[in-house]
Image (cartoon, rainbow, N blue to C red):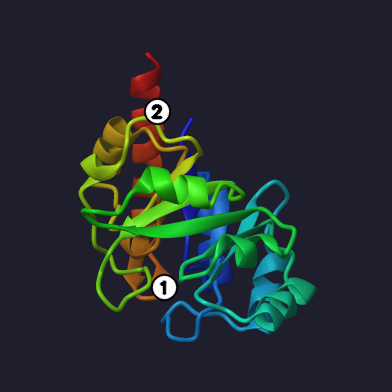
């Protein structure tokens, strides 16, 4: 079963919609340059609205240690997600499960990345767009992903209801991660797009299990 993460949640109503349709995890962005950035008080409010057994993931880009600890003091995150140039030592120092985002392009050795970040729960694979650290809405060449990765892969980058089934069939990721592909405008989700995306994932899983 392919897990589903809806990232860039900024509103309680979007959070509830994602959960209602079957999202396994919700992403909160702690990066001021992002249009989906949330403050610590607002993130804490969103966390209070999150029901049991739904994971909250905190996304950071080259944060300071104090910044991460400040979030963790107020927001009950289940997983950290690092999107910058963080080292394995930096990511692991918080004694929490973490994902390391890798911006994929030709020449990036994903097997080496998995070895370097062996302490991660998984690698989140996103499109490489110069100067942008994620949330680009761009896809990448999925054939660049080795067939036998030694850790779970979370596939991201330009996914939507139209291409997610194709992506799952080709990559067979542990999870898929979507943000802009289910938005009305940046930071505001679209109910119909969330429903269509999650239904496509579940339908594809059903087909593959037969």
Q: Which x, y percent locates residue 124?
A: 44, 53
- Categorize mark 2 by other alpha carbons within 10 Å: few (<14), some (14-19), many (20+): some
Label at residue 11: none
Does residue 146 sit above or below 101 in this rendering?
above
Mark closest to the chain's N terminus, 1 or 2: 1
Q: Nearer the viewer, residue 99 or 114?
A: 114
Residue at image mark 2: 205
Q: Nearer the viewer, mark 1 or mark 2?
A: 2
Of 77 and 180, the residue lying toward us: 77
Left or right: where 41 falls relative to 204:
right
Residue depicted at 74% across the width and 71% down the height: 72
Question: Which quadrant of the figure has residue 93?
Answer: bottom right
Q: Nearer the viewer, residue 120 or 28?
A: 120
Q: Is 173 positioned to the left or the right of 105 in the image? A: right
Judging by the rendered image, the residue that carries numbered circle 1 is 188
161 displayed left or right of 80:
left
Rendering coords of residue 208 (x, y %): 35, 21
Residue 160 can be seen in this image: yes
User: What quarter of the picture does the C terminus occupy?
Assistant: top left
Query: Based on the displayed image, in which of its 4 quarters is residue 198 positioned?
Result: top left
Q: Which residue is drawn at the image coordinates 39% and 24% (left, top)? A: 206
Identify which residue is drawn at 70% across, 54% down.
51
Instruction: Residue at 36% x, 31% y: name it.
Output: 203
Q: Is residue 170 left or right of residue 6?
A: left
Spatial CA span between label 1 and label 2: 27 Å
Q: Secondary structure at mark 2?
A: helix
Neighbour tally class for label 1: few under 14, some 14-19, many 20 plus, Cα within 10 Å? some
**Local SS, label 1:** strand
Q: Is residue 176 visible?
A: no
Above or below 174: residue 134 = below
* Percent x, y of residue 66: 71, 82
Using the image, determine if residue 169 lies above or below residue 194.
above
């Amino acid at each position: 079963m392919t897990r589903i993460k809806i990232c860039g949640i900024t509103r309680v109503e979007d959070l509830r919609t994602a959960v209602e349709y079957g999202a396994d995890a919700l992403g909160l962005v702690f990066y001021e340059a992002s249009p989906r950035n949330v403050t610590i008080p607002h993130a804490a409010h969103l966390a209070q609205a999150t029901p049991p057994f739904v994971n909250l993931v905190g996304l950071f880009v080259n944060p300071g240690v104090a910044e991460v600890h400040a979030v963790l003091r107020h927001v009950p995150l289940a997983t950290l997600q690092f999107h910058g140039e963080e080292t394995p030592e930096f990511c692991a120092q918080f004694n929490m499960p973490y994902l390391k985002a890798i911006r994929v392009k030709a020449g990036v050795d994903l097997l080496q990345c998995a070895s370097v970040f062996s302490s991660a729960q998984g690698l989140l694979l996103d499109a490489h767009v110069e100067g942008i650290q994620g949330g680009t809405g761009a896809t990448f060449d999925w054939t660049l992903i080795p067939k036998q990765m030694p850790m779970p892969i979370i596939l991201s980058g330009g996914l939507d209801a139209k291409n997610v089934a194709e992506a799952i069939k080709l990559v067979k990721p542990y999870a898929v991660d979507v943000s802009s592909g289910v938005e009305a405008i940046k930071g505001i989700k679209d109910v119909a797009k969330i429903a269509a995306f999650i239904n496509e994932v579940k339908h594809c899983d059903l087909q593959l299990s037969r």
